Amino acid sequence: ILNVEQSPQSLHVQEGDSTNFTCSFPSSNFYALHWYRWETAKSPEALFVMTLNGDEKKKGRISATLNTKEGYSYLYIKGSQPEDSATYLCAFLKTSYDKVIFGPGTSLSVIP
Amino acid sequence: GAVVSQHPSRVICKSGTSVKIECRSLDFQATTMFWYRQFPKQSLMLMATSNEGSKATYEQGVEKDKFLINHASLTLSTLTVTSAHPEDSSFYICSARDDGSRTGELFFGEGSRLTVL
């Protein structure tokens, strides 16, 4: 059984604060780690696809890092805005055509 | 960007009836699609991997006769909840992998809220 875990489960921050969450996954047989953002009443959307140990990716105020040897990824949001409020999901694949297993998500609320 | 359409978005049915949910990739081909179920306050639980032209691969504990999956074309997968019961009430969401994409991210439908009375 693959365990993909995320912490914290939920987070409330003030507008302008920076924040980060963690995704942990099995460190053996790694192919890719995805991050998705799921806003209420919308479909989950991919933020990052990460495949190499040491990868760092950035999209605007959001960035992510990857450590495949120890099995974790961090997602950072700089200067949180209310529109960042969403559930952030990470997902793990062992091979390129493997099933995609999701973590439980981190629910972020940014208070204006 | 790639679009996946899922419908119906909401369905209410009587116990014992069957409900079909469709998942279509609108602007790309998807040999592989995934069906997930979300229980209240929980994450996405993978039910099955749908493969065009072959049988779906079901996760442990998911009844294949209960949740029939058909992936008849490169743009359409359907999930049929057969003889639905109240415990099948849930949020079901599909996702598709673009055959032409090297990055492999998933594109999701809007989800379907099933309520079985």
Image (cartoon, rainbow, N blue to C red):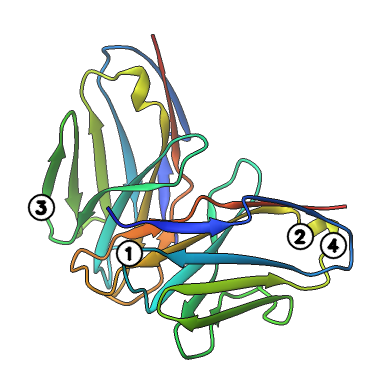
Query: Are callouts 3 and 4 both on one chain?
Result: no
Disc nearer the start of the sequence (2/1): 1
What residue is shown at x 53% (from left), y 83% (from top)? B56
The residue sitting at the bottom extreme is B54
How far is disc 3 from disc 2 in space, using C-alphas? 42 Å
Any mark on residue B88, and which? 2
Nearer the observer, A99 or B103? B103
Instruction: Identify the chain of the residue marked 1, using the numbered disc in the image.
Output: B
Amino acid type, callout 4? His
Viewer-side label of 3, 4: 4
Q: Amino acid at mark 3?
A: Gly
Question: Could you give the CA–CA distance between mark 4 and mark 2, rounded to whole angstroms?
Answer: 5 Å
How far apart are the two marked residues, 1 and 4, measured between alpha carbons? 35 Å
Residue A54, label in figure: 3
Q: Residue A13: percent from the left, percent from the top? A: 38, 16
Are labels 3 and 1 on one chain? no
Q: Is residue A95 above or below residue A3?
A: below
The reply to whether dot 4 and dot 2 touch (C-beta < 8 Å) is: yes
Disc 3 + disc 4, Cβ < 8 Å: no
CA gap between label 3 and label 4 equals 47 Å
The answer for how far apart the CA atoms under marks 2 and 1 are is: 31 Å
Question: Residue at 24% of width from left, 69% of height from top?
Answer: A31
Type of amino acid under label 2? Asp
Does dot 3 land on a helix, a strand or a loop? loop
Could you tell me residue A103's position as x and y percent? 44, 51
Q: Position of residue A68 (x, y in %)?
A: 20, 59
Label drawn at residue B27? 1
Q: Which residue is mark 4?
A: B85
Q: Position of residue A95 (x, y in %)?
A: 28, 75
**A98 is higher (above) or lower (below) than A33:** below
